[in-house]
Image (cartoon, helix red, strand yellow):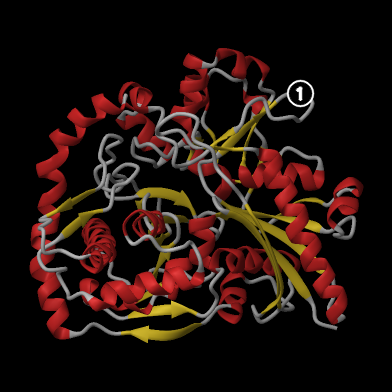
Amino acid sequence: MTRTVLGIDASTTAIKAIAFDADGVPVATGRSSLQRQSPHPGWAEQSAEDWWQGLVAAIRDVIGQLESAGAGMPEAVCITHQRETFVCLDEDGQQVRPAILWLDTRAGTQIERFGDAAVHATSGKPPSTTPSLYKLIWLRENEPLTLERTAMVLDVGGYLAYRLTGEHVTSTASADPLSILDMAAFDWSPELLGLIGLPAESYPRLVPPGQVMATVDAGASASTGLPEGTPVVAGAGDGQAAGLGAAVLDDDRAYLSLGTSITLGLHSTEFRTSMSYRTLASPLAGSYTLEGLLASGALSLEWVRGAIAKLADTPDGNAALSALAGSSTPGSRGLLFLPYLTSAETPYWDADARGAFVGLGEYHTTADLVRATFEGLALEVRLLLELILADTGTDPGRLIVMGGAARSAVFLQILADVLERDIEVSSEDETAALGAAVLAAFAVGLHGRADLAATAARMTRTTATFRPQADSSATYSRLFAVYRLLYPQLKGVFASLGEFRR
């Protein structure tokens, strides 16, 4: 009978549950879509109850498939999830208000007032729109009754673990993007908690990634079909988990995750901070992930597909979008796209920054605008990569790409040409879920021994490799010199336009 573990990816757009075997091969998959609400410009919210109902539906689908195939029930469950998103629960475990998402930008004034060097040095996170700390301070200042009713603050992984086990517990690698941990100690920071005003008992117990946090209780077993007593393993945020799904556990390789946001991550054994990246807890307990962030990654592609190309949000629509980009030429006939649709994160950390097409002429076609969007994302990745490499002094020999946008061969070739290096593609589309499954397999010794690096090496692999084309790379090298001037030139304009949004 096939032995399995269950990797769950609770992303911004869907709950995905995938049963993997000991070799990292998917055996069964379930998926439930999520919607987000924006009650005001810049706000982004979801219902935590929707997370749970989506998880129940996805797991039930997987359990049904495993039973039909005669495969074994999952021997452990591990959750990866959208980071920085959090929910406030009352004493009865009910959400006090909708959860606030990582891409929510409401806390601009709080970032300006509280986002100082001391917070950065402790949390590892430069002041920006993503950390939960500033949104929790916003709640204190704008919705005081919300915090008065709050008995527990949970990240997405912690909330789903609570619904599965009845315990308030989460992984250090799930909680750290909230930016209220002392990252040198991997524990809640009294100083940062003091900025919010909730007592320490309002935050869950912390467990290092890869360790069993609790087990599935009777109620969750009845809801999901998982056997009661199934271990629930401490996971990591989706970026770090995707890195583990590419076996990024030393400095010889890096990951590039092409999801709603684009993240570029390197492994580090030492705690270090910089404005060029954010410092996160690695899935390898006691280590760190140094990560560059572009908040509007596939979000930019989603926007240009609907607003500019007028293509449906379907696989055929995505393929048509790539075909449009491929029909234009490198450089998009002198058109550049600055991909800051929600904000600028690494390295500028500017909540007022927004996207821009620069060089637009009446001769530009839809294909040019689409290609410029792909190229803008790739040029931004080059900026992130150069800054991280300059700060760390390392240069990983392998760059592993994953995520939904990695299905576009046109985009991957543009990335290889812009970055002037080989791009290896993960064999598993759902790399974050695979990373969670690696932690689950490690925790229960599914391979016969508890060694995270060996487990990751066995369960992960790459398929295609995209190599740079000399002519295109030469064009993009010249274009990059122009691209890196865009934000500094437009910074003041963005700040002025922000007044009209507010």
x and y percentages locating residue 476 in the rendered image: 14, 71
Image quarter where the N terminus lies is bottom right
In the rendered view, does 455 fall on the left or right side of 299? right
Q: Where is residue 11 in the image (x, y as percent from the top left)?
A: 57, 53
For label 1, the residue is: 91
Residues 93 and 395: in front is: 93
- Front residue of this view, candidates 353 and 183: 353
Can residue 249 be seen at all in this image of the molecule? no
Q: Which residue is drawn at 33% across and 62% down?
A: 309
| Quarter of the view holding residue 353 | top left
Q: Which of 501 and 168 is in front in this view?
A: 501
- Is 40 situated above or below 69? above
Left or right, 379 with respect to 200, comes to left
Residue at image x 76%, y 74%?
4
Give the quarter of the image for residue 289.
bottom left
**Exactly how many numbered labels are in the figure?**
1
Residue 155: percent from left, percent from top: 60, 40
Residue 189 lies, in percent from the top left, at 51, 31
Q: Say if 99 sits above or below 231 in the image.
A: above
Q: What residue type is disc 1 on? A: Glu
Residue at 29% across / 65% down in the picture? 374
